[in-house]
Image: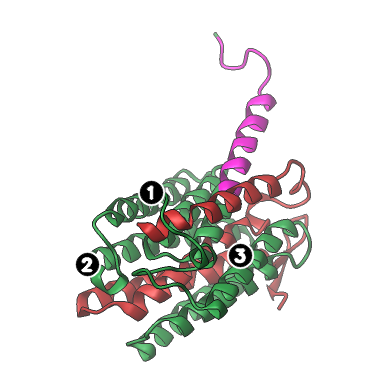
Chain colours: A green, B red
Amino acid sequence: MIPPVGAAWLGAQLDGIDPSPVVAGAYLLSGLLLFLGLWFRTGRHGNRWAMAGIVTASAAAVYSHDVVNLPEMVSAVVIGGSIGLLLARRSAVAALPWLMVAGHGLLGVAAMAMAATLWRNPSAFGLTAHDGALLAVGFGLGATTLTGALALAFRRRLGELALLGSGAGFAAAALGFAIGNSAMVMGGGMAGAVGLRLAWRARRIASRALPSGAGLP
Amino acid sequence: MTGALALLPLFLAACAGGYVVARPRADSDRSAWQSGVGGMAAILLVGALIAAAEAGSARARYIALIALLCASVASVLLLGVPERRVLPDGEGDDGMDA
């Protein structure tokens, strides 16, 4: 049975309530900015389109929800942002790729913690019993991303970084499905697909680089 | 779950867009960690914000704040690190370009 759709295509539809046009438009704009960030990622400032998209979606999320603990949220964002900014600005150049690995690992932790929050408090988010599978997928992908980041860090290999981005992206998409957030679904889907294709391409290039008969007795 | 099914077309369109954009030879002049692809996954920050905003019980709120803290650090790292100017010989500047 295909559910009735309409404005839900454009944004969150929780408890049968269609999203506000402003919020739905902001989420769509965010998805477009994220796509532009991917499209121009080879350029010097392509990454800033993605920043604009995430800021737009974050502003729409805060605007459209009943925020019960704003001081704690602002504190968490300021403390976390300061730590990230300090690390990104002051670390040695050789450490920058490992900061990316650490960032993906932290996203895995965030996905696991977000899934745990939704699981502990389903009524606040309008979740039903069917959404448990989505929460499990989000939690599992977050745990996989964290494990992969730890494995890359310990083995000192960067070859599978795109796969970490894919895992974190699909975790975001699964959790976005659970809470009905179109920006997370779009951004997570794009990140997941891009990561999968880049990882597949890197694997093909690596296998072609081996000389014929390599590894054979 | 109704909302989830309604969002499925957007998800499929986003996956198709991402697959098309990750075209071959797009990243030939920059290494993988500099390409900015990792920043896409930072959209998880939005979910952490919503979770922290709506969490009712005290324990759920603490877990959501942990999620928000981790997502904030990760977002700044994944979006900020590729902004560092790194010269081809591995030398870099002393900060970001912003």
Chain ID of residue with mark 1:
A
Q: Nearer the viewer, mark 3 or mark 2?
A: 3
Q: Residue at x 43, y 86 (%)?
A: A74
Callout 1 secondary element? helix
Both marks 3 and 1 on one chain: yes
Q: What residue did someone put label 1 on?
A: A147
In the rendered image, residue A131, in percent from the top left (x then y), is placed at: 30, 56
Q: Which mark is residue B42?
A: none
Q: Residue at x 66, y 65 (%)?
A: A32
Quick one: A64 or A100, which is closer to the camera? A64
Measure the C-alpha gap from mark 1 to mark 2: 23 Å
Residue A136 lies within the magenta run: no
**In this view of the protein, can residue B97 be seen by the observer?**
yes
Q: Which mark is residue A31?
A: 3
Residue occupying the far top of the picture: A217
Callout 3 secondary element? helix
Amino acid marked by disc 3: Gly
Stretch in magenta: A193-216
In the rendered image, residue A46, in percent from the top left (x then y), is placed at: 73, 64
Measure the C-alpha gap from mark 3 to mark 2: 29 Å
Q: Quadrant of residue A127?
A: bottom left
Q: Residue at x 54, y 66 (%)?
A: A10
Q: What residue did someone put label 2 on?
A: A120
Quick one: A207 or A214, which is closer to the camera? A207
Q: Nearer the viewer, mark 1 or mark 2?
A: 2
